[in-house]
Amino acid sequence: MKHLLSRENREVLAQLAWSRVLVAFDFDGTLAPIVSARDDAGMRTRTRELFEHVCGLYPCAVISGRSKADVASRLGSAQIKYVIGNHGLEPGSGLSEFEGEVRRARTLLDESSLGLLGIDLEDKRYSLALHYRRSRNKRAARAQILTAIAALPVAMRVVPGKLVVNVVPARAPNKGEALLELRGVEGADTALYVGDDVTDEDVFELDQPGRLLTVRIGESRSSAAAYFLRDQREMDRLLAKLAALRQKRVA
């Protein structure tokens, strides 16, 4: 994993800016800092300004674990071309079936989760998220969540996150599949994707040399991303660089 903004990797972004590229981001932990209360999540003022600028120069996408409506409401006035929610499945086909599976799973998880102090079940219509950030015993809470999910009669996929366990219908598309579809729709030769969490590994693990540049917020030996930014605040540097390089190309 290499630091994308190092001097040695300047040419990587320069070549990207000159290509037919789709630029895509996760939201929480990527465009916006991680916060303790999920409803408070939002971009810093400078990040929002830079993001809006980049969206005017490149075809851009946000692929988030949040519902599409939720994440779209947090993107300000950016002229973003694609907004994908629920870990890659929204919008898409089969939504009514996924909604039914999630509704059934929620009913059963509500029953099994009674008494698990500090666990917050978030219903995103087409997926669920069980947050245990406020639990006093996080290890025990996570173990009980996984046990309850394993007992479900509905086939669900578990997507771990930062103090959250996401529950997605097993047949639903993931972030990687969503990104590849968007790249095809856009007719782009390549794509840049920036994310920060286990949920983004579905993109990072795609083997697409020359056609996909993957970037993780925070260096990690266990991640399949090719490049990293040191922390979420470096997003501002990346966005500014993308804008400057594209403007230079246009000029």
Image (cartoon, rainbow, N blue to C red):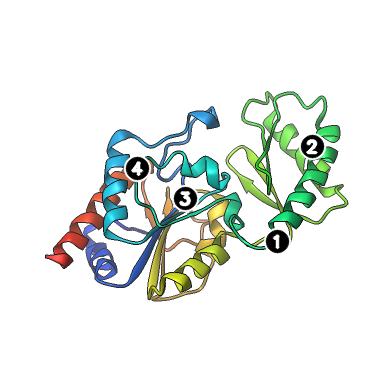
Element under disc 2: helix
Mark-to-mark CA distance, 2 and 4: 41 Å
Quarter of the image for residue 56 reads bottom left
Mark-to-mark CA distance, 2 and 3: 28 Å
The residue depicted at 50 percent of the width and 43 percent of the height is 71
Task: Bin the neighbour count of mark 3 within 10 Å (Cα to Cα): few under 14, some 14-19, many 20 and up.
Answer: many
Along the line of sight, which residue is nearer the eye, 155 or 83? Answer: 83
Q: Tell me residue 228's x, y (percent).
A: 39, 54
Of pointers 2 and 1, the one earlier in the residue sequence: 1
Task: Bin the neighbour count of mark 2 within 10 Å (Cα to Cα): few under 14, some 14-19, many 20 and up.
Answer: some
Mark-to-mark CA distance, 3 and 1: 23 Å
User: Looking at the image, is mark 3 or mark 4 nearer the viewer?
Assistant: 4
Q: Are marks 2 and 1 in contact (CB under 8 Å)?
A: no
User: Which amino acid does the dot numbered 1 rest on?
Assistant: Gly
Q: Please name the residue that numbered disc 4 is placed on.
A: 77
Q: Please name the residue that numbered disc 1 is placed on.
A: 94
User: Looking at the image, is mark 2 or mark 3 nearer the viewer?
Assistant: 3
Of pointers 1 and 4, the one earlier in the residue sequence: 4
Mark-to-mark CA distance, 3 and 4: 17 Å
Q: Is residue 163 left or right of residue 82?
A: right
| In the rendered image, the vertical position of residue 171 relative to residue 104, given as above or below | below
User: Which amino acid does the dot numbered 3 rest on?
Assistant: Asp
Q: Tell me residue 249's x, y (percent).
A: 17, 67
Q: Please name the residue that numbered disc 2 is placed on.
A: 144
Q: Tell me residue 46's x, y (percent).
A: 27, 37
Q: Please name the residue that numbered disc 3 is placed on.
A: 26
On the rendered image, what quadrant is the N terminus found in?
bottom left
Of pointers 3 and 4, the one earlier in the residue sequence: 3
User: Looking at the image, is mark 2 or mark 1 nearer the viewer?
Assistant: 1
User: Looking at the image, is mark 3 or mark 1 nearer the viewer?
Assistant: 1
